[in-house]
Image: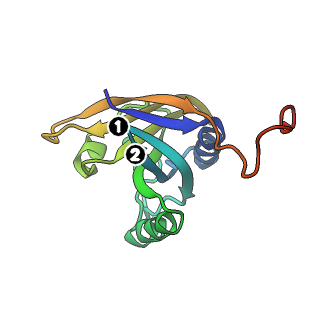
Amino acid sequence: MSGLELSAPDAARIHAHLAGAYPEEGCGVLLGREADGARRIERVLPLANARADTRARRYLIAPEQFLEAERQAREAGLDVVGFFHSHPDHPATPSAFDLEHAWPYYSYLIVSVARGRVVDTRSWRLAADRSRFEAESIAASQAPAPAGGGAGTEGSR
Ligand SMILES: [Zn+2]
């Protein structure tokens, strides 16, 4: 099973954005890098759901939003490695619509938000034959150490 590494602060940002979008679907882009087979999220970009209608059941990341995310990734030396969105009052499993619109390679993080509260977070990748999604593990990564940190920063949190 492939895996995703996500820091607690980034997970909290995703959850806050998606809980705030409730009862509509919220969405955003995951920026990160791959190393030794692990995909590590380094930055999350919460976005407005660009759909004009049915935002309670669908989301859209518009082409210009995607291009802007790619630009920000390039500037930071990162790649767009996935997307996140919420399922208001539905499980964190991909819908038929999600499968139809998914692209290979990317991680699709889905968060179930029930009555405005985050209840489940799962990540998925399209299978090689594109017929289904495969579950991907989510591991908590350490937040990057602050520049110039080291000795003496202990207890500063
Ligand atoms: Zn979905």
Image region (quadrant) for ligand 1: top left
Disc 2 residue lies near ligand 1 with CB under 8 A: no
Residue 105 shows in this picture: yes
Tell whether 6 sits left or right of 129: right
Determine which of the numbered discs, if any, sits on residue 53 in the image. Answer: none
Structural crowding at the residue carrying mark 1, measured as other residues with C-alpha within 10 Å and reported as few (<14), some (14–19) or many (≥20): few
Tell me residue 23's x, y (percent): 56, 44
Quadrant location of the C terminus in the rendered image? top right
Disc 1 residue lies near ligand 1 with CB under 8 A: no
What distance separates the C-alpha of mark 1 from that of mark 2? 6 Å
The quarter of the displayed image where residue 124 is located = top left
Tell me residue 71's x, y (percent): 47, 71
Kindly state the secondary structure of the residue where label 1 is placed: loop
How many marks can you see?
Answer: 2
Tag 1–tag 2 contact (CB < 8 Å): yes
What residue sits 17% from the left and 42% below the top? 130
Quadrant location of the N terminus in the rendered image? top left
Tell me residue 142's x, y (percent): 62, 35
Determine which of the numbered discs, if any, sits on residue 37 in the image. Answer: 1
What residue sits 52% from the left and 67% below the top? 72
